[in-house]
Image: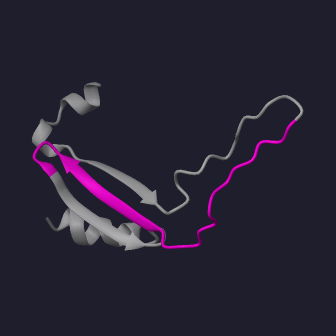
């Protein structure tokens, strides 16, 4: 806490990454009656996966990048969207 106290709130930023695909809501475990197998009825979807990375400051979202697939160029995001702004 002492190290963080040296900065004003305007100097702090927090980065978070999240992803979404059509299978995100599917459960990996299920329940059923004793002696019966759990069945999950859902469509198999092989589709688009999106990843969003954002920088949050006291003023709101300062930088945002959405890519198809996973975020493989994280350092580029930092250099081009966070540091230059």
- Report the magenta stretch's main SS: loop
Residue 24 horizontal side relative to residue 17, left or right: right
Residue 9 horizontal side relative to residue 4, left or right: left
- Give the residue at x 51% y 63%: 22
Looking at the image, residue 62 lies above or below residue 9: below
Residue 32 horizontal side relative to residue 34, left or right: left
In the depicted view, which residue is nearer to us: 53 or 11? 53
Q: Position of residue 53 (x, y in %)?
A: 34, 59
Residue 1 horizontal side relative to residue 9, left or right: right
- Give the residue at x 49% y 63%: 21
Corner quadrant of residue 32 = top right
Q: Position of residue 5 (x, y in %)?
A: 20, 28
Question: Magenta segment: does it hold 40?
Answer: yes
In the depicted view, which residue is nearer to us: 6 or 38? 38
Looking at the image, residue 84 lies above or below residue 58: below
Q: Position of residue 29 (x, y in %)?
A: 70, 42
Report the span colored magenta.
36-60
- Give the residue at x 29% y 67%: 65
Task: Report the label total.
Answer: 0
Q: Position of residue 84 (x, y in %)?
A: 17, 68
In the depicted view, which residue is nearer to us: 15 or 67? 67
Question: Magenta segment: does it hold 59?
Answer: yes
**Scheme of image coloration:** one colour
In the depicted view, which residue is nearer to us: 38 or 48? 38
Tell me the quarter of the image containing the C terminus. Answer: bottom left
- Give the residue at x 25% y 63%: 64
Tell me the quarter of the image containing the N terminus. Answer: top left
Looking at the image, residue 5 lies above or below residue 48: above
């Amino acid at each position: 806490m002492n190290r963080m106290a040296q900065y004003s709130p305007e100097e702090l930023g927090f980065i978070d990454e999240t992803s979404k695909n059509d299978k995100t809501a599917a459960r990996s475990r299920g329940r059923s009656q004793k002696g019966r197998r759990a069945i999950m009825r859902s469509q198999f979807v092989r589709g688009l996966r999106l990843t969003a990375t954002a920088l949050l400051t006291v003023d709101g979202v300062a930088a945002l990048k959405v890519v198809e697939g996973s975020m493989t160029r994280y350092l580029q995001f930092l250099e081009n969207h966070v540091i230059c702004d």
